[in-house]
Image: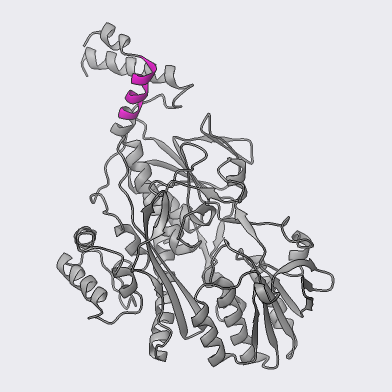
């Protein structure tokens, strides 16, 4: 890599893209994978595992269990106070992605 | 390290240095990008922690050592909860690696990407998050200034104002009148005035049963209205009177000396008067130029980046978040989405389109809770309710259902505050 070639590339545009690239190198990706749309909102109510928690913890729960619960909330099969209203906001595909991500959280 | 690599690093560094004036303040490639968050409430503290978890260098600017949470502060007014249950420190946030600047942010220069602090120091940023909550508009309601708020508290920012209103209620005689002025939309915590009326009615019914409660409203409808009004019939018949906008409820002037609220149709004097005035985004948002003429901050619904200033994101009550109400739950959810978007942007990637949730509980009585929920996604540049989802608790539900929602309300508060501050 010649000094000349690098220097000739130093237009403002390339400087800017280089700056972005260099910043990118300094930002590690999220440890537990990228959260799918909607997933991070759950922990507002569903906290970490705590004895006697009134609201069920979700992190680390089996994915299929969460998917089944969401489907039952959506159809009304499972009684709910608020989750019936929330489950209806997510498609099957979105629900599966959220459940899979939640199951991998510590 | 080889010669070539060293040379390249030097050249890269030189390039960035040369570009600094127009593009970035960054001079060293290995330093993680710097994010400054202003505001240590539900939105800001959540966002700061989430950014830190993503490997970014984060400074949280918050002037107060203790944050007093608004959700459940109506229970403090009713004597059901000590104010200490509402108070949180940023110690755990700091322990997690977030730098805390316990100072007031006084200015923002979007060109040089610098936040000025009250002591004359400053903080440079690659991305700035403003989560300043609301400011009370002391210019909006004639007669209602800061001096008037010491006589007729707003108690719409929890803390001293909450305690002041509580003391006034305690001092009120049985048979007295409590009068509330409720604001027009938009404002912090849409169901809040009606939860407050409910819990104060609970206090009065228990301790001063001959008292009355009057709500003068600048609106014709309000959040969870059917649920509140049905419960008022059951719990507090003949105690709460609600006067809507179209029946002359809008307060247009106040007189603190006589504790009087003036409407187009008459004057209402109370023994205890609570004025919930119009609000706007917190001061730093106005200073930074991210608030529009409405006083609130238009944002991109994917990244929460300001529509008015690049590299500045606005979350929580200060933002115009479409269908999402100004609530602690919303601010917490937005803080996480905004942090993810900023991390993506700083990696040079496009952020993924988010989906957000809000759930707001209100207490009508200690063991009677109701809720409103919503799911939101960006549509035509605005966070919009996902059709078919959300809504309020059912109108006809057994007491066990209401009791369960009251339990969930408290559980939500404990979970969220431990996620944000624990």
Q: Is residue B86 left or right of residue B358?
A: right
Q: Please, which residue is most extreme toward the right here?
A: B257
Dominant secondary-structure state across the stretch colored magenta? helix
Give the vertical position of B127 relative to B7 (above or below): below
Q: Is residue A15 magenta?
A: yes
Which residue is at a point 44% across and 81% down the rendered structure image?
B406
Q: Please, which residue is most extreme toward the front here?
A: B246
Q: Nearer the viewer, residue B317 or B242?
A: B242
Residue B300, how many percent across, how many down? 43, 46
Which residue is at a point 55% across and 43% down the rendered structure image?
B290
Residue bounds of the magenta highlight = A11-21
Could one spot residue B96 in this view of the protein? no
Which residue is at a point 41% across and 88% down the rendered structure image?
B396
Q: Is residue A30 magenta?
A: no
What color scheme is it? Answer: one colour
Q: Nearer the viewer, residue B201 or A61?
A: B201
Q: Quadrant of the N terminus of chain B?
A: top left
Q: Is residue B180 left or right of residue B370?
A: right
Q: Quadrant of the C terminus of chain B?
A: bottom left
């Amino acid at each position: 890599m010649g000094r000349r070639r690098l220097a000739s590339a130093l237009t403002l545009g390339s400087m800017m893209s280089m700056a972005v690239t260099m910043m990118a190198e300094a930002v590690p990706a999220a440890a537990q994978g990228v959260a799918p749309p909607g997933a991070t909102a759950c922990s507002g109510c569903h906290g970490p595992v705590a004895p006697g928690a009134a609201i069920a913890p979700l992190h680390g729960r089996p994915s299929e269990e969460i998917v089944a619960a969401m489907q039952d909330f959506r159809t009304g099969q499972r009684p709910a106070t608020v989750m019936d209203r929330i489950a209806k906001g997510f498609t099957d595909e979105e629900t599966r992605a959220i459940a899979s991500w939640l199951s991998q959280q510590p | 390290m080889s010669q070539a690599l060293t040379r390249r690093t030097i050249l890269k560094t030189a390039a960035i240095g040369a570009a600094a004036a127009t593009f970035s303040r960054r001079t060293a490639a290995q330093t993680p990008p710097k994010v400054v968050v202003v505001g240590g409430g539900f939105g800001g503290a959540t966002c700061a922690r989430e950014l830190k978890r993503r490997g970014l260098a984060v400074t949280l600017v918050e002037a107060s050592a203790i944050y007093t949470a608004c959700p459940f502060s109506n229970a403090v007014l009713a004597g059901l909860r000590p104010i200490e249950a509402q108070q949180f420190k940023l110690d755990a946030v700091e322990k997690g690696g977030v730098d805390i600047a316990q100072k007031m942010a006084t200015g923002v220069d979007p060109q040089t990407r610098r936040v000025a602090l009250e002591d004359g120091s400053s903080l440079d940023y690659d991305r700035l998050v403003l989560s300043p909550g609301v400011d009370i508009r002391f210019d909006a309601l004639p007669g209602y200034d800061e001096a008037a708020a010491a006589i007729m508290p707003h108690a719409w920012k929890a803390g001293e104002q909450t305690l002041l209103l509580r003391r006034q209620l305690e001092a009120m005689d049985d048979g007295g009148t409590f009068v509330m002025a409720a604001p027009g939309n938009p404002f912090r915590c849409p169901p809040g005035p009606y939860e407050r009326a409910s819990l104060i009615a609970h206090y009065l019914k228990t301790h001063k049963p001959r008292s009355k409660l009057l709500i003068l409203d600048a609106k014709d409808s309000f959040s969870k209205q059917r649920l509140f009004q049905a419960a008022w019939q059951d719990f507090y018949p003949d105690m709460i009177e609600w006067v809507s906008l179209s029946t002359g409820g809008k307060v247009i002037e106040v007189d603190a000396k006589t504790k009087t609220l003036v409407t187009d149709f008459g004057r209402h004097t109370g023994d205890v008067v609570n004025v919930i005035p119009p609000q706007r985004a917190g001061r730093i948002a106005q200073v930074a130029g991210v608030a529009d003429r409405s006083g609130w901050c238009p944002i991109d619904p994917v990244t929460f980046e300001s529509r008015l200033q690049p590299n500045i994101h606005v979350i929580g009550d200060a933002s115009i978040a479409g269908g999402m109400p100004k609530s602690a739950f919303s601010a917490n959810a937005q803080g996480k989405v905004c942090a993810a978007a900023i991390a993506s942007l700083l990696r040079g990637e496009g952020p993924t389109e988010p989906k957000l949730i809000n759930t707001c509980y209100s207490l009508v009585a200690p063991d009677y809770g109701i809720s409103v929920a919503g799911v939101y996604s960006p549509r035509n540049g605005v966070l919009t309710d996902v059709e078919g989802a959300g809504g309020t608790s059912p109108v006809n539900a057994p007491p066990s259902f209401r009791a369960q929602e009251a339990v969930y309300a408290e559980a939500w508060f404990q979970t969220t505050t431990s996620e944000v501050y624990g």
